Image (cartoon, helix red, strand yellow):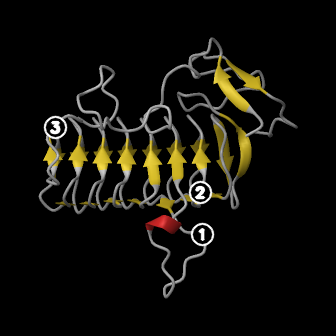
Amino acid sequence: PSTALTEAGGGDAVRPLCGSAAHPVGNPGGGRRPDRCGPPWGLPDRGDVIVEKAMVHPTSILDGGVVLGDGTRVWQFCHLQAGASVGEYCTLGQNVNLGPGVRVGNGVKIQNNVSVYQGVTLEDQVFCGPSAVFTNDRTPRAPYPKGPGGYLPTLVREGATIGANATILSGLTIGRWAMVAAGAVVTKDVPAHQLVAGTPARAMGWVCRCGHRLDREFHCPACGRQYRMRGKIKSFPKP
């Protein structure tokens, strides 16, 4: 995006992101990172399910190669497909589906009836509201499946919120601490801290990492954080 909102003092620009190219989820080299980013790598991987200090409801199904981090809770009727990886202290509500190889960071909350399909990555502290919808194919046809090689990857960056019943088209990036309103249909990338709503989703303003809307000076009236804009914006959307 041509504009970017960052917290004054650089706090939003220095921390490496779980799942980004610079800081991928997991640690294929083995061993747990000092910052505990991602699931508990370094445990033996024999294609079996790795669950250490996590809670899984007996009605849920975990396929081979699934990894759950410490403190994660998986509730009723979930299905985690082969190779899915979930970080520490996450919550997966009822009837959540994770596609093959999906990566979920630490502290993520996925509410009821959400399917995170193959090709979607959720970084740390992402919130997915009930029945939020992800896709991985923009031109699906039943008799012409593309397979994983034809899926468009979607990245939801650290701290972003996807509202209830929102739809995220494939191949997009939802920026850090962005907020997608309930029922929105997102058809293009969303910059960090931007609030989008509607069908198709459009910019409605900017939000703090605490979730409150910023004023015209990019100040949060709730927690006092101050932000700065890099680049130019044509106008500040009306409340």
Kindly identify the amino acid type of the residue bearing the numbered disc 3. Leu
At 62% from the left and 57% from the top, the residue drawn is 184
Q: Can you give x and y, in whole percent of width and height, for residue 194 in the image?
A: 66, 38
Mark 1 neighbour class, 10 Å CA radius: few under 14, some 14 to 19, many 20 or more: few
Q: Are marks 3 and 1 in contact (CB under 8 Å)?
A: no
| Residue 214 in view | yes
Q: Nearer the viewer, residue 122 or 133?
A: 122
Q: Which residue is mark 3?
A: 43
Going from N to C along the chain, the mark reached first, 1 or 2, is 1
C-alpha separation, residue under disc 2 versus residue under disc 3: 32 Å
SS at circle 1: loop
At 77% from the left and 21% from the top, the residue drawn is 217
Callout in the foreground (3, 1)? 3
Q: Nearer the viewer, residue 103 or 199?
A: 103
Q: Can you give x and y, in whole percent of width and height, for residue 161 in the image?
A: 51, 43
Mark 3 neighbour class, 10 Å CA radius: few under 14, some 14 to 19, many 20 or more: some
Q: Are marks 1 and 2 in contact (CB under 8 Å)?
A: yes
Kindly identify the amino acid type of the residue bearing the numbered disc 1. Arg
SS at circle 3: loop
Residue sitting farthest toward the top: 9
Going from N to C along the chain, the mark reached first, 2 or 3, is 3
C-alpha separation, residue under disc 1 versus residue under disc 2: 9 Å
Q: Which residue is mark 1?
A: 138
- What number is the disc on residue 171? 2
Q: Quadrant of the N terminus?
A: top right
C-alpha separation, residue under disc 3 versus residue under disc 1: 37 Å
At 58% from the left and 45% from the top, the residue drawn is 174
- What number is the disc on residue 52? none
